[in-house]
Image: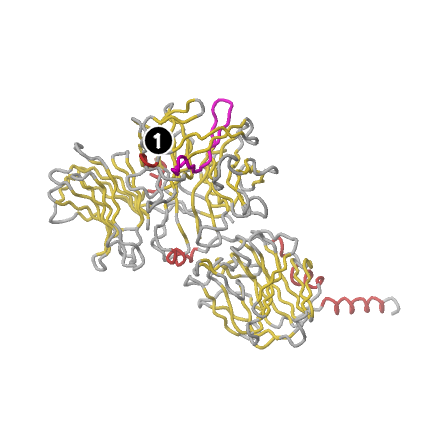
Amino acid sequence: MKRIFPVLVILILCISFTKESKPLYQWSFNSNKIKSTIEENTKTIYQINSNFETPEFVNGIENTGLRFDGYSTYIEGSLPSPLKLPVTISAWVALETFPTDTASFFSLIEENSNPENWISASINKFGKPAIAIGTNGEEKYYFAEHRLSKSKWFNVCLIISEGNVNLLINGEAILKIPLNKVTSQTTFNSLTIGKNAKEKYLENLFPLTHINGIIDELKIWNEPLESNYLIENEIGDKLNKRTDLAIPFSRFKKDFNRPKYHLLPAANWTNETHGLIYYKGKYHIFNQKNGTNLFLGQINWGHFSSPDLVQWTEHKPVLTPEEGYDEIGIWSGHVVLDNKGMPLIMYTGGNEKEVGMCLAFPKDDNLIDWKKFSNNPVVKGPPKQYKRRDFRDPYIWKEKDVWYMIVGYGLIENDVQKGALLLYKSNDLKKWTYLHPLFKGNPETDHSGIFWEMPVFWKMNNKYILAVNPIPYDGKPAINLYWVGSFINEKFVPDHKLPKKLEVINRMLSPSVSLDKNGITTAIAIIPDLIPRELQLKHGWTHLFSMPRVWNLKNGEIYQTPHPSLIKLRDSSKVFENVNVNSSSNLKLGSGHQIEIIAEIFPLQSDKFGFYIGKNLKNDESTKLCFDLKKNQLVIDQTNSSRTESIEKRIEIGEINLKNRKTIKIHLFIDGSVVEGFINDKEAFTTRIFPKFYDSDQVEVFSENGSILINKLDFWYLKSSNNLSDF
């Protein structure tokens, strides 16, 4: 008995120390069919606020968790009963991105105060966790010297006692602050989950203080728990559980305007593409990405890869802003293979004082993880002789053993603003010397604008194509212009003074150009939405990328055609041959949201003909693509394109020469809201349509002022490219 007694004492003590403390309230976010979640102990129902119809219950740390989108999803409501100190509140979180502004995982709110007082566990846009305090209308943030990780589960916990607040990450105390106004009389009446207690907006529209990721197993105890208890009972071995932050399929299930075979991110904002390359058996392309919200801000470099230029996988961003030289964003740039055949990124990074060119190098052959160069920025601001501070968008190429880089810029000469490209050279891609402008515009004669972005300098057939994007100015939208010429004495010498438009109707911008695996020049570019911001926020995605296009240089012009890889998308088809169409009746081709058409048309007596797309007789929606041979114009009439009131009713006109052609070949791709067209295997055009009704998807051929003969027309229904994400 003497030997047994000490053992019993130890067992009793161990049991007493490890006894589980039951939460007063807990939310497990188990899936249900209604737009709500339940506090499990009291069965109180809390509404889930979101732009989307279906709550996004996904794989959590235990069973399911709730997916927060970064701008619209949150929970708020009164606690089942008032909560007095001391309090411990914790939750499991997995982040897709850091927030746009400092955002809260959860907040406890003292509603009876005026204005409300609150305490939150928060995180800023650089991943630094914080305790946020709201007192008498004033907000204060206390940041820990710690950086949270994305795409990994972590446990965040606040312990609020009389006089102080502790913040713990994974059971480790990382921040403690005194708070004299928190007393034994403090009572919390409500909470928020997934956003700040006090919201902030950009332009009174975009919410800034929301969480983008998964939150699961939120628990509240009416006692101060010890760190060891949390580690043993709440954390355990859960930290290594795999996260799945892919956007749920349900989010866009009913969005018939969202393209299905074009490349675009899984959600949220995107802008230009960068650095299309073929490397170790895969295509890679990068993009400007705000994965948290629906506006141009918090820009990361996103990343996609593909085996065939058709089916793409989106990966986690390769570069994200950090405090310091690139804290205001990872802006546009270029990707090249260095002297050893390894990819590198040159991007525009900046802070409030300076904008510079910065390098990054891959850590693996799949280009998933990258490391920024220790001596960034490698070019610190524009040359000292120029006053304009903003310069951006580097493009790199090699001549023999010398590397050259151009950077988009704008100069003022003789009181005239003009676009320009500043030229640098290097032997190792790390140390750069400024030379002079590679080329300058002359806007009074060539209408090339006052500042050039996203330059491309691409060699074909012993000639160089210089393409630039003048920024919007004096009421003129951004377009893509190009010259063809030579690189002589380290300057570009164009063959013709006036540039050409990349497209007849130029709604495609900033192409990324590379050789495919067969040595074919291939380009992918951004296609903007051209819709109000309110609709972008409602949709939950903004902009997309063009289909891969083949470039050929003939007679000083770029000839554009769809890349042959796109044939893989074709599904069922039908053929029309030797069909006459006149003004008395249209030829109905079929209906659908994903379609390809190749038509060979002989005009006969008609000088106006084309296609109605997105047509719906019942609701009077349609878009008219008209080829006007008399005026040598392509006219896209969108005055009846959509019954959505905020959609602009516009007519787009592009100049095109179709005279003296016996047969006109028209190649169309329709994919939800995007339309890409090719004419005679040369000219290209792009537009966007956003019909209000799902059945606005009929396609017809029309002719005015006489007949046309359709020699042959192939009509395909196209499959989805089944793009994936692995974050």
Q: Is residue 267 visible?
A: no
Q: Is residue 504 above or below residue 140?
A: above
Kind of residue indicated by mark 1: Trp
- Residue at (18%, 34%) from the top-left corner? 659
The stretch in magenta equals 396-419
| Mark 1 crowdedness (10 Å alpha carbons): few <14, some 14-19, many ≥20 | many
Q: Is 49 on the left or on the right of 177, as rendered?
A: left
Q: Is residue 401 magenta?
A: yes
Residue 632, how many percent across, how many down?
Answer: 20, 38
Badge count: 1
Question: Mark 1 = which residue?
Answer: 483
Task: Label 1, secondary structure: give it.
Answer: strand
Picture coordinates of residue 654 (x, y %)?
25, 41
Could you say where residue 388 lies in the image, as x and y percent from the top left?
47, 40
Q: Nearer the viewer, residue 279 or 237?
A: 279
Please tell me whether the stretch drawn in magenta is mainly helix, strand or loop. strand
- Residue found at x 59% / y 51%: 149
